[in-house]
Image (cartoon, coloured by chain):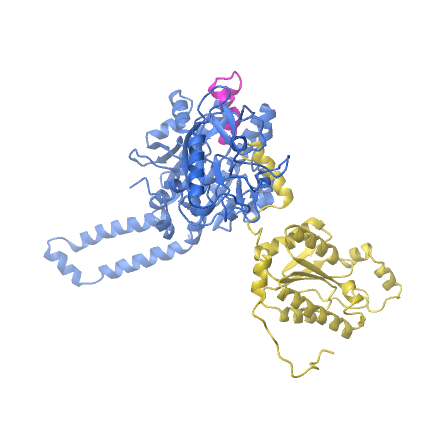
Chain colours: A blue, B yellow
Amino acid sequence: MRSKGFVRFSNEALMSDLFARPDKTLCFAAAGVSYRKVRKHIMGILKKIITSNNKKRLFVLGLDGTPFTFLQKQMEEGKMPHFQRMLEKGSFLRMNSVIPCISSVAWTSFLTGVNLAKHNLQGFVDRKLNPFRVYIPTARNIAVPTISEILSEAGKRVVSINVPVSYPPKEVNGIQISCFLATDLAKAVYPKHYYSYLKEIGYRIDVDAWQGRKEKEKFLKDIHYTYDKRLEAAYYLMGREDWDYFQLHIMETDRINHFLWEQWESGHETYAAEFDKFYNKVDQLVGDLDARLGNDVEFMILSDHGFCSIKKEVYLNQWLEKNGYLKYKTDAPKSVTDMHPQSKAYSLIPGRIFINLKGREDEGSVAPGNEYESLRQELMEKIIHITDPDTGEKIVKKIYKREDLYSGPFYDDSPDLVVVPNDGFDLKGNIKQPNLTYKGELVGMHTDDDAFFYLRNYDIEPQEFGIIDMLPTIAELMEFPMKEAENFDGSSVLS
Amino acid sequence: MTEQKATNITWHGGSINQEHREQLLGQKGVTVWFTGLSGSGKSTVAREVEKKLFQLGHLVYVLDGDNIRHGLNKNLGFSPEDREENIRRIGEVAHLFTDAGVITLTAFISPYRKDRDKVRGLMKEGQFVEVFVDCALEECEKRDPKGLFKKARAGEIKEFTGISAPYEEPENPEIKLDTKQQTLEESAGAVIEFLKEKGIIKTNSQDAYSDDEKEIINKRLSDLGYV
């Protein structure tokens, strides 16, 4: 494998040279130990270290939005026998996500080991100022190297399939097939020549979520088809490529959760079984990979967040408008960018609140310093008490100030406040909603404390940790020191 | 024609330079030089690029072959010497526009390699982007938007590029377009993509999506309830 051969050779040469020095013999003889024996022993240890250094390979299976507690339940009920078998030979732990709890932010923290003020992927949508606009961030906006780039630079061979956020694909030492942020398969593949293969097998980037809302049968078919094709491509590349790091991302778990979670939870006569059937397929994948990978490859499985049923969608901009903090320039605003200069605050999905700060926002109205601080305080005190007008239930679990969560070069772009809801209240960024809450077509939403982490062949002590700790963990697992480590916000769960 | 006639002159620079102007405009000055046969689509693509860049908020200007011959170069014909002088003058104008920080698009047949290379030589590294608008002669003749091929075939136009005068294809153009295969949208998109990659258009350099793609991704994310 390219440079590795050279490394091995030079280390061995170095060792031989070391042990070839005759004066050492005398030292060992004086100590009453056979020099040959000692040499053999030490050579053995060194060789083991060097060889293992060269061969540390890792396979990561990402199951987007699959909760720890859900897997536990399925296993208890005997619905996921393969995964259950894996528990005997590895560690299965509950893991925290990130705040705000969004796949693109969580996986970017996984890929980079840092918080969003360092990697700059702050949401599925984000804002740019001067002029004020809302846009969809992509891999181009990630400000620090991702694991694929770090390993590529060191000459390691990487394969990454469908991992958020990997569009547009990077020119890695290996292969990247972009995530659901890609609109056209032809532009989603690096190197380009794999495109024709993917096209030929009928590979799909993502399911059509619209069907999830309207035609559940078609949606389920789509889920299975997209998932099967993803696996077909993954197995093809696993066999064909000489990889050191392989990350396969299953997005269909998140998609089925979004549209059928409630049905599963309530034991719907058709869809609960369909739900179990799909997860049974995922269970088979886990068993199959376990067998295929063999014990010389490390095997990690994880999700990025948990899930729960949606009671109501909640529109914070509606609350801000109604309470006099947000106004629009026109009667029919298209987005928050049509905000009136007198506005004090606005929100982007999910639960991110930005103060209309003078000197920062295009038409700021709130002075920095005391005015800003007292407004944040006021909003926190009011928003924490918001209730569902229909049921009186408390909507908000906690509100963070940006300084409680983030640090880094993109801190100034981060939200001034982040609202974390109670389970069941899905915070949205829609504007001009007639009511604060609404029960819509989406039935499942993310939770930030119920992701899972599994690592084969390791006995990891129970601890509180998050997805941000994964890259340091991988660095240790692959025995690969990363120069980026000094910037990491997390730490390895192995040590 | 290109000898230095004026003597005792000194280049006078002010305290404001190209970089300052570029900062003001939020873009980099550049000359995008479209070259190709008559009817290959140079002006059409240039005008489309102009429209798109303008919509993105950029200062952009098209120097178009026929238009320049109406004024600045009205005293030039189509002999090899006049063609050379035509391109030299346009090159100098494009150079000034580029220095002004403008995204300058030129659409001239500019058939001779050495003339184009001379213009390249006027500019700093990276400020001259040669776009070869490749289109087979038969296709150009079929299009014949100005009826010129017909006239040339009838012998009414002398020294017509591709028929009675040579066209020297660029050897290493920055961009090669195939206007027979590509749609106008694709051709213009390729030029804009290149300008983005090179950091010439800065404001939207991190946007990964075209307007059409934005619609697709917005729909996908909104179906998921993410936007």
Name the spot of residue A201 as percent of width and height, x first: 58, 38
Would you say residue A178 is visible in this rendering?
Answer: no
Asked if the stretch drawn in magenta spans residue A481, the answer is no
- The one nearer the camera, B58 or A243, is B58
For the N terminus of chain B, which image quadrant? bottom right
Name the spot of residue A332 as percent of width and height, x first: 64, 35
Answer with left or right where residue A349 lies relative to residue B213. Answer: left
Tell me what residue is drawn at x 65 percent, y 51 percent.
B189
Answer with left or right where residue B141 lies relative to residue A415. Answer: right
Rendered position, B172 above or below A325 = below
Rendered position, A259 above or below A242 = above
**Which secondary structure type mostly characterizes the magenta part of the structure?**
helix
Quadrant in the picture for residue A216: top right
- The one nearer the camera, A335 or A256, is A335
- What segment carries the magenta color? A252-274
Name the spot of residue B221 as percent of width and height, x first: 56, 35
For the C terminus of chain B, which image quadrant? top right
Would you say residue B55 is visible in this rendering?
Answer: yes
Most distant residue in the top direction: A269
Quadrant in the picture for residue B70: bottom right
- The one nearer the camera, A153 or A213, is A213
